C-alpha cells in the first residue's frame, strides 16, 4: 500500500491477491475508497481493482469470475465511459482461457477498454511470435485482440526495447508476462508506459500514465 501511495496510482490492477471468499482483509488506507475483488474459495488466484479517492468514479456494471481470475468493471469517470478488465491467466491452456475471457470482456465493453493483468505467457508472443505456444493458437488470440481493437501499450511505445516483469526462481529466467492492452483509438491519451523494478515480489509493476482527463 505504501508503494501505491508513493506512486500516486489512480487505478490499480492486482493479481494473485490470494483473498478467500468472504475473507477479504481490511486494507489500511483511506487513499483508495473503492475496492472490487474476484476471489477463490481456496485462497489461490485472486484479482482486485482499487480506485483512488481522488477519482470521480461511478460503477455502472460489473462481472466477477467465481474462479478468481477475471474482474470486469464498467464505469464512468468524468464524462468518459471506461471498461476495465483485470485478469490472471492460468499456468496451462492459457490461450483457450484468454479466448473465453476476451469473449466475456467483449460482452461488457462500453467506451474506452483497458485490459490488464498477468498473461502467464510472454506478451511479446502476441506481437513477435516468440513463444512455445502453437502458432495457430497465437493467431486465434491475435484475431480476438484485433476484434476488440486492443493493442499492447508498452510494446507500442517501446517497439525495440527489451524488459521483463517476472523472475522465475525455478528456471532462473526473466520474462515479460504482465501487460496492459488499450483500445487502439485511445493510444494518443497515453503519456508514458514503464516497467518497474522487482520491489516486493518476483513480479514488477507495469505503470501506464495517461494525460489528465478534462472534467465534464
Image: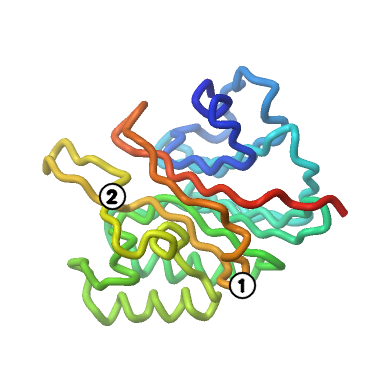
Q: Residue placed at 53% from the left, 43% from the top?
A: 13
Q: Residue placed at 53% from the left, 24% from the top?
A: 1
Q: Nearer the viewer, residue 182 or 65?
A: 182
Q: Position of residue 89 (x, y in %)?
A: 39, 55
Packing grade of label 2 (10 A; few <14, some 14-19, many >=20) is few
Say left or right for 195 vs 104.
Answer: left
Q: Residue placed at 50% from the left, 43% from the top?
A: 47
Packing grade of label 1 (10 A; few <14, some 14-19, many >=20) is few
Q: Position of residue 142 (x, y in %)?
A: 39, 76
Quarter location, residue 123? bottom left
**In the rendered structure, which disc, 2 or 1, sits on the residue that comes first in sequence?**
2
Dot 1 falls on a residue whose secondary structure is helix
Give the label on residue 97, or none.
none
- The answer to whether 44 is drawn above or below residue 181 in the figure is above
How far is disc 2 from disc 1 in space, using C-alphas? 25 Å
- The answer to whether 32 is drawn above or below residue 179 in the figure is above
Q: Position of residue 56 (x, y in %)?
A: 80, 42
**Number of marks drawn:** 2
Q: Position of residue 113 (x, y in %)?
A: 62, 63
Say left or right for 208 vs 26.
Answer: left
Task: Tell me if label 2 and label 1 are in contact, CB under 8 Å.
Answer: no
Q: Residue placed at 38% from the left, 59% from the top?
A: 158
The residue under label 2 is 163
Say left or right for 34 vs 206.
Answer: right
The residue under label 1 is 185
Dot 2 falls on a residue whose secondary structure is loop
Q: Nearer the viewer, residue 31 or 195?
A: 195
Which residue appears farthest toward the right when viewing the image? 216
Which residue appears farthest toward the top when viewing the image? 28
Which quarter of the image is occupied by the C terminus? bottom right
Amino acid at each position: 500500500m505504501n508503494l501505491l501511495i508513493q506512486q500516486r496510482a489512480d487505478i490499480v490492477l492486482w493479481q494473485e491477491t490470494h483473498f478467500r471468499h468472504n475473507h477479504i482483509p481490511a486494507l489500511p488506507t483511506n487513499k483508495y475508497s473503492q475496492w472490487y475483488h474476484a476471489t477463490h474459495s481456496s485462497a489461490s488466484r485472486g484479482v482486485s481493482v482499487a480506485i483512488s479517492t481522488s477519482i470521480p468514479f461511478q460503477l455502472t456494471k460489473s462481472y466477477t469470475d467465481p474462479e478468481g481470475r477475471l474482474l470486469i468493471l464498467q464505469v464512468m469517470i468524468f464524462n468518459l465511459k471506461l471498461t476495465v478488465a483485470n485478469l490472471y491467466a492460468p499456468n496451462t491452456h492459457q490461450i483457450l482461457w484468454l479466448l473465453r475471457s476476451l469473449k466475456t470482456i467483449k460482452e461488457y465493453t462500453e467506451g474506452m477498454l483497458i485490459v490488464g493483468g498477468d498473461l502467464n505467457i510472454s506478451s511479446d508472443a502476441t506481437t513477435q511470435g516468440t513463444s512455445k505456444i502453437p502458432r495457430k493458437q497465437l493467431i486465434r488470440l491475435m484475431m480476438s485482440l484485433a476484434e476488440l481493437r486492443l493493442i499492447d501499450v508498452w510494446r507500442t511505445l517501446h517497439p525495440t526495447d527489451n524488459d521483463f516483469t517476472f523472475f522465475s526462481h525455478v528456471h532462473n529466467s526473466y520474462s515479460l508476462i504482465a501487460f496492459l492492452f488499450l483500445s487502439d483509438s485511445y493510444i494518443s491519451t497515453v503519456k508514458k508506459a514503464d516497467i518497474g523494478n522487482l520491489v516486493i515480489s518476483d513480479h514488477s509493476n507495469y505503470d501506464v500514465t495517461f494525460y489528465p482527463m478534462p472534467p465534464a
